[in-house]
Image (cartoon, helix red, strand yellow):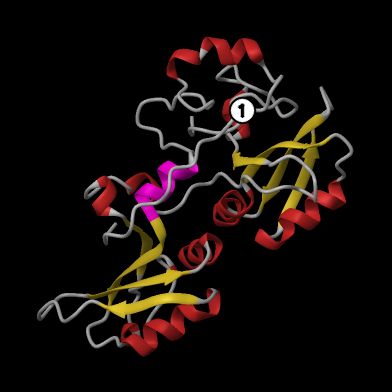
Amino acid sequence: LKSEAAPQPTDRRVPTCRGRRRATARRGAGAMKRGAPAAPVGMPSLEFADIDKAIDKRIFVGKMPNGTGEDELRSTFEGFGALTECRMVPDRGAGSNAIGFVAFNTWSAAHRALLECDGKKQMRGHAGTSSTIVVSFAERTQNVGRGGGIAYAKGLEVSRVFVGRVPEDVSEPELMDKFGHCGTIESVTILPAKSRLRCAFVTYRFWGEAMDAVEQLNGQSLRAGAESMTVVLAQPRDKEVARGGYSAGAGAGHGGSMG
């Protein structure tokens, strides 16, 4: 994992979904600062603000052959999405591999580039060898120091978001339409109504798409005149029951940490 400094993000606080697993919420109240369960020691936070503080929509590209140019770097990654930065690091000396940085305008583009190229893609100078480039998210060392973003170096496997404060009469097609522009939706689950507002889960193909949904839709309204939605990364399903939190049909502990 390599790193570059970048501007500090704006903190985003995450409200809880009212009425879900109140007993669980009370048990964890001492460790919950923003309505999310405390992360087990060594596990990365799922809070968007924490992730956005540690990494950006920028990837580090390493183990490129000496002589690799910016044009080749650009042509390798521009097919994944619009680039906001593409540059090679100046000559690092004889015998050193070339490295560079590529930034995208969406999390999904950066994550897809990582998934498809890390340990798989060869540059022209690799011809005749088994060598490949390495790709990881670049740290924001200005915010977290060197190594502070290593937990997110390869992205996360969480691809589901919790959606709170949607109208009681919400439908799957309406959620698909609102959330579909952030990525390919694999499933939508609307939870039983407990009040005039409801909660739901939306599952994408991979983490970068879920991150775009959180960044773009948290605090937005599903429709004109509706309440502002809560959109956060959801806890992995296989950990929810083991930790005594919500099951697939409940919403407490919807954001926060990967356990």
From the top left corner, tell me how far across and down residue 120 is, in percent. 44, 70
Identity of the residue drawn at 37% across and 54% down = 55
Is residue 182 highlighted in magenta? Answer: no
Left or right for 98, reference 198: left
In the picture shown, does residue 55 fall above or below 46? below
Q: Which three-letter amino acid code belongs to the residue tagged 1?
A: Thr
Between residues 104 and 120, which one lies in front from this camera angle? 104
From the top left corner, tell me how far across and down residue 42 is, in percent. 35, 31
Q: Does residue 124 show up?
A: no
| Magenta-tinted stretch | 48-55
Identity of the residue drawn at 59% across and 26% down = 253
In the picture shown, does residue 30 fall above or below 179? above
In the picture shown, does residue 141 fall above or below 47? below
> Circle 1 sits on which residue?
16
Q: Does residue 227 show up?
A: yes
**Secondary structure mainly formed by the magenta segment:** helix
Crowd tier of the residue under label 1, counting other residues whose Cα lies within 10 Å: few below 14, some 14–19, many 20 or above: many
Q: Give the structural element (helix, strand or loop) at label 1.
A: loop
